[in-house]
Amino acid sequence: MNVNTAHKITQQLLAAGHTLAETDEDADVIIFNTCCVRNTAEQKILSHIALAKQLKQHKPDLKIAVIGCLSAKRKINGVDILLGTDNAMDVVEKLGVAVRQLPAEQGTTAYIDITYGCENYCTYCIVPFVRGKLRIRPRAEILTEFDQVKDTAKDIYLLGQNVNAYPDFPKLLEELAQKDGDFTLHFLSAHPKDFALETIKVMAKYPKIAHDVHLPMQCGCDKILKLMNRKYTVADYLEKIRLLREYMPDIHITTDIICGFPGETDEDFAETVRIVQQIKFSAAYIFPYSNRSGTAADKMPNQVPFRVRKARATKLVELMRELA
């Protein structure tokens, strides 16, 4: 989603006569499009902003803009423009550039937002607090944007923090898959609790829908899934995997896994390892649990030491390398 926002802002500025600078020192404008889902990302972006502010001391006309999740979470001093996720696109206007209506085309790959925000309130996740509650994009807007890109883009991605929370998502998927054009349709990211059998059937029915799905499991232990407020069990998740492979034997399944969530014991982690071995994902994004201020998990008892979180994540990464 951040790639999509950054692309649209870049295209607006290029259309207005700006050019991409080779280095920070060459730039008249530096825009930081931020994510703060994990603490490491937040600290990294803060260090980059600090370097830009140092540059501004020697180049006072330099404009620094910070947009996105980090701006919604905290005040950042010493920058010219500070915008959250809902009004990130206003950065173009704030820079004094006339906004033009541009086609949604992004080369061979196109991204189309269909939902914004999330209200699942997983206890580790800061997204609902920085991107707001679930908002549904009007169907007519989605169809119009899709029609703009379907004849040129090879891969079209439907995007959302919880993409399959879109009302009657299988019907939307089916409608788009029936359109003319030499494209492959994908969607990111799906929540296991909302992943319906009807979606699987539509995926299997239409050749234009890619046989790939990103289905974040987060943990393979029911006790921890409940603490995470994920609203499904390991058995529920395994059944979704079984159905995906039954209807599409060639399905490419990827996932997210958090290691060292508060209260996770060695035995709990061993359950996750066992489930990963059983499912044999095509790939997995594996992270040590990251404390985020303002989330329920940050105040939970039995916080796992970071060295243990990291060791578990490393062990799981090594296992995934073997399996993949």
Image: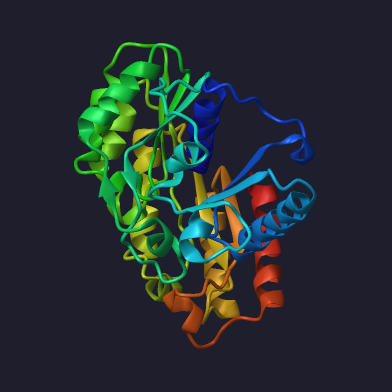
Residue 156: quadrant of the picture: top left
Q: Is residue 206 visible?
A: no
Residue 247: quadrant of the picture: top left
Residue at the location (35% across, 58% down)? 132
Side (left or right) of 199 relative to 228: left
Model colouring: rainbow
Q: Residue furthest front?
A: 60
Up-down relation of residue 1 to residue 304 (above or below)? above
Q: Position of residue 35 (x, y in %)?
A: 55, 54
Q: Position of residue 303 (x, y in %)?
A: 57, 83
Q: Position of residue 100 (x, y in %)?
A: 41, 24
Quarter containing the C terminus = top right
Residue at the location (58% across, 69% down)? 290
Q: Position of residue 26 (x, y in %)?
A: 76, 35
Nearer to me, 245 or 149: 149
Q: Is residue 283 visible?
A: yes
Residue at the location (50% across, 88% down)? 301
Up-down relation of residue 144 to residue 287 (above or below)? above
Residue at the location (43% across, 60% down)? 130
Count every numbered label the image shows and give the total.
0
Up-down relation of residue 280 to residue 224 (above or below)? above
Up-down relation of residue 143 to residue 77 (above or below)? above
